């Protein structure tokens, strides 16, 4: 019965295009063959092996992408009486309030269409500078509830940053008896608004899948009209592709989120969240990914895909983008090395960090090949096996970004022709985005080695 309803309530197709990979690969392989040599060096051996190291995650991404290629967003028209709490942790900086208001107002606008019982919980620190402005703006709304984290609050495991705030919010729900099986928590970031598809997918999941699947993760989209800076806007093209490839493989196909989760577009049954918790220890850690691993350990085979987007905003500047990438790598590395889970669940994050690090040589090699083809350097560098691996992994990344660019383009208002964006995307990836992503990862590794514990909030476009 559900399959019929599922087909009936699915909207436009916005999946992954597989064919573009071949179109990119063959020109690259021809390029490297024309500049190849049979001379092996230690660097050649290292580069070939490091790029081969990424083959498992590339294979997983292709399987996930092939399976999700017919992805359609939810257009469910039904309703649910189960309680849904939209939880939004935020620092509440005045400079970012307009972005937060966009998120809150989107929920107020769309939630009534499918939900009978819902509430918005804003989780703020006691020292947040925007508390009074938020209270004033939503004073007449019964839908908006503020959870204020006291300055002196210390969790059992002495968690820091967002983990600490989420654990306090969980304690708040427990104290109010809001952790039953008929209550669900929908997690959002303070720059990720919802649409009619988001709310429809939540209601559809609760009606048809909620008894079997205790957690569901959707797709993060980044409409270009929400972004001010062209480089971060194009760099965030990889994020919806990641959701429809790697994350889809684990969360939707294996139904076990072994690569973690996002802290937004995430639906969790309240009793399961109360059982697992967010108290992850006194290091900056990827709280959402840690939650995903803990869920995988306790509830294998019980996660599902949420056929909907949330609509986020890319960083306001290149420097903010680099800070964001640095934070990601610090938090993921801390989870892999120090996370409060058995090592077998953390190994995939250690592997992911090493895979990210291997991108350094990919970007260096491209520059060297260009210089060699222009006869600006004379030494021979690329062996045929090395060239094949470089062309394959590099075309994979271009494919990754191209697909995400297309998805973000599709959800953008006042769209310009996509082909113009695609023509900009490819050289940007070669010469700007790839090196910047690598720089953010290197910076993050350096911050991890320094045992950095601070949490930097980046500016959100208003």
Image (cartoon, rainbow, N blue to C red):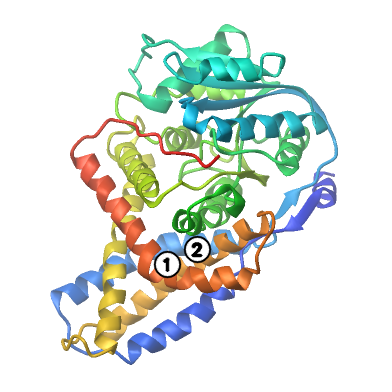
The residue carrying pointer 2 sits among few (fewer than 14), some (14 to 19) or many (20 or more) residues within 10 Å by Cα, namely many
| 370, 48: nearer the viewer | 370
Secondary structure beneath disc 1? Answer: helix
Query: Percent x, y for residue 200?
Result: 76, 39
Q: In the image, is residue 325 above or below residue 271? A: below
| Residue at the spot of label 2 | 401
Q: In the image, is residue 122 above or below residue 201? A: above
User: Cβ–Cβ below 8 Å for labels 1 and 2?
Assistant: yes
Query: Percent x, y for residue 338?
Result: 28, 34
**Residue 279 makes an appearance in the image:** yes
The residue carrying pointer 1 sits among few (fewer than 14), some (14 to 19) or many (20 or more) residues within 10 Å by Cα, namely many
Q: In which quarter of the image is the N terminus?
A: top right
What residue is drawn where x is 44% and y is 58%? Answer: 231
**Mark 1 or 2 closer to N-term?**
2
What residue is drawn where x is 54% and y is 29%? Answer: 97
Q: Quadrant of the C terminus?
A: top right
Query: Percent x, y for residue 324?
Result: 38, 44
Q: Distance between the residues labelled 1 and 2?
A: 8 Å
| 300, 348: nearer the viewer | 348
| Residue at the spot of label 1 | 429
**Residue 179 makes an appearance in the image:** no
| 265, 46: nearer the viewer | 265
Total numbered labels placed on residues in the image: 2
Secondary structure beneath disc 2? Answer: helix
- Which mark, residue 380? none
| 307, 165: nearer the viewer | 165
């Amino acid at each position: 019965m559900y399959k019929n309803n599922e087909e009936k309530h699915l909207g436009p197709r916005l999946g992954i295009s597989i064919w573009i990979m071949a179109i990119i690969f063959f020109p690259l392989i021809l390029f490297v063959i024309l500049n190849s040599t049979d001379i092996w060096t230690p660097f050649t051996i290292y580069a070939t092996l490091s790029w081969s190291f990424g083959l498992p995650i590339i294979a997983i991404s292709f399987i996930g992408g092939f399976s999700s290629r017919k992805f359609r967003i939810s257009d469910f028209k039904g309703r649910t009486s189960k309680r849904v709490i939209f939880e939004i942790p935020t620092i509440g900086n005045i400079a970012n309030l307009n972005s937060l208001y966009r998120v809150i107002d989107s929920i107020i606008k769309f939630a009534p269409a499918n939900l009978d019982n819902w509430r918005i919980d804003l989780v703020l620190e006691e020292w947040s500078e925007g508390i009074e402005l938020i209270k004033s703006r939503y004073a007449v709304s019964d839908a908006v509830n503020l959870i204020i984290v006291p300055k002196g609050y210390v969790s059992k495991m002495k968690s820091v940053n967002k983990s600490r705030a989420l654990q306090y919010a969980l304690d708040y729900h427990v104290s109010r008896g809001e952790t039953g099986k008929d209550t669900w928590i929908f997690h959002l970031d303070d720059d990720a608004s919802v649409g009619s598809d988001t709310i429809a997918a939540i209601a559809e999941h609760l009606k048809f899948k909620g008894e079997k699947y205790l957690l569901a993760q959707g797709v993060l989209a980044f409409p270009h009209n929400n972004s001010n800076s062209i480089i971060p806007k194009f760099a965030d093209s990889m994020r919806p592709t990641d959701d429809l490839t790697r994350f889809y493989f684990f969360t939707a196909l294996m139904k076990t989120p072994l690569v973690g989760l996002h802290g937004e577009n995430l639906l969790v049954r309240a009793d399961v969240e109360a059982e697992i918790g967010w108290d992850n220890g006194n290091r900056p850690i990827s709280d959402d990914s840690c939650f995903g691993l803990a869920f995988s350990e306790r509830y294998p085979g019980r996660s599902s895909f949420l056929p909907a987007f949330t609509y986020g905003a890319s960083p306001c500047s290149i420097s903010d983008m680099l800070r964001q990438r640095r934070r990601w790598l610090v938090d993921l590395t801390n989870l892999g090395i120090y996370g409060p889970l058995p090592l077998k669940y953390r190994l995939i994050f250690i592997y992911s960090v090493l895979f990210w690090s291997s991108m350094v040589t990919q970007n260096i090699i491209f520059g060297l090949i260009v210089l060699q083809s222009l006869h600006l350097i004379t030494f021979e560098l690329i062996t045929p096996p090395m060239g094949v691996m470089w062309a394959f992994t590099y075309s994979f990344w271009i494919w990754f970004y191209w697909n995400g660019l297309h998805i973000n383009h599709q959800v953008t208002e006042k769209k310009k022709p996509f082909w113009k964006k695609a023509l900009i995307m490819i050289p940007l990836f070669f010469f700007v985005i790839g090196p910047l992503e690598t720089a953010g990862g290197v910076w993050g590794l350096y911050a991890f080695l320094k045992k950095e514990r601070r949490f930097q909030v980046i500016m959100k476009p208003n």
